[in-house]
Amino acid sequence: LAGSYALNPNMDYGQIIDTLVNMSSTETMQITIPEGYSIAQIKQLLLDEHVCTEDALDEELNTYAFKHEFLQSELPAEEGWLEGYLFPDTYNFASKDVSIETIFATMLDEMEQVLEPYRSDIEASRFSVHELLTLASMAEKEGIGNDRADIVSVFINRIDSNMSLGSDVTTRYAL
């Protein structure tokens, strides 16, 4: 694993190899993004971890053109454009000096892998990836466990009937 290791000049080759093979880097970084976190919460978590400055974070969030296919309909980048796309998980990086670009690219790579098995279903759907992720995010905040599929079904029925979604989640998010 790439990173920094504690070696000293008195070590022989065997000790150096043993250290590299059996010890983890002294400068690794682990970041956990909980499910349901908004972009604002992810930004605060990254700032609390001292990943980068707020200006650098905002610039990366709002201007970098990520290569991920599922984001192409979202370009050009606008403020908050990655809302719902940064996959919640625990990520391990080999260095504490990891760039914010690498962190976001890793989270988006994970989202791409999660979406891949559903690509044909998504393409056949009348909804965009953005709309589907929005519905999923709303269901995540509205319910728990197996209730989420029923919640999305209710939302879709209300959309089809030109009704209000009747969701406090959207109001809470806006506030």
Image: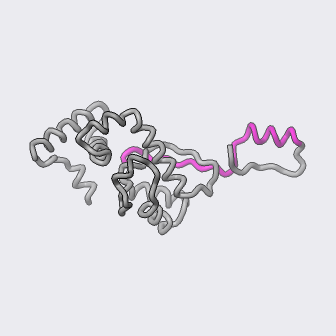
Q: How is the image coloured?
A: one colour
Determine if the magenta segment contains residue 31. yes
Query: Who is closer to the viewer here, 73 or 28?
Result: 73
**Where is residue 110 drawn, in percent x and y?**
47, 42
Q: Where's the C terminus, which quadrant?
A: bottom left
Say if 128 sits above or below 54 in the image.
above
Determine if the magenta segment contains residue 84. no
Which quarter of the picture shows residue 119?
A: top left
Identity of the residue drawn at 10% across and 46% down: 163
**Where is residue 18 drawn, in percent x and y?**
80, 38
The magenta segment is: 13-36
Query: Who is closer to the viewer here, 162 or 23?
Result: 162
In the image, 94: left or right of 60? right
Residue 106 visible in image:
yes
Residue 138 visible in image:
no
Query: Who is closer to the viewer here, 145 or 116?
Result: 116
Which quarter of the picture shows residue 151?
A: top left
Say if 163 sits above or below 45 in the image.
above
Identity of the residue drawn at 51% across and 43% down: 90
**Where is residue 89 drawn, in percent x and y?**
47, 43
**Where is residue 7 drawn, in percent x and y?**
81, 49
Identity of the residue drawn at 72% across and 51% down: 4
Query: Who is closer to the viewer here, 82 or 69?
Result: 69
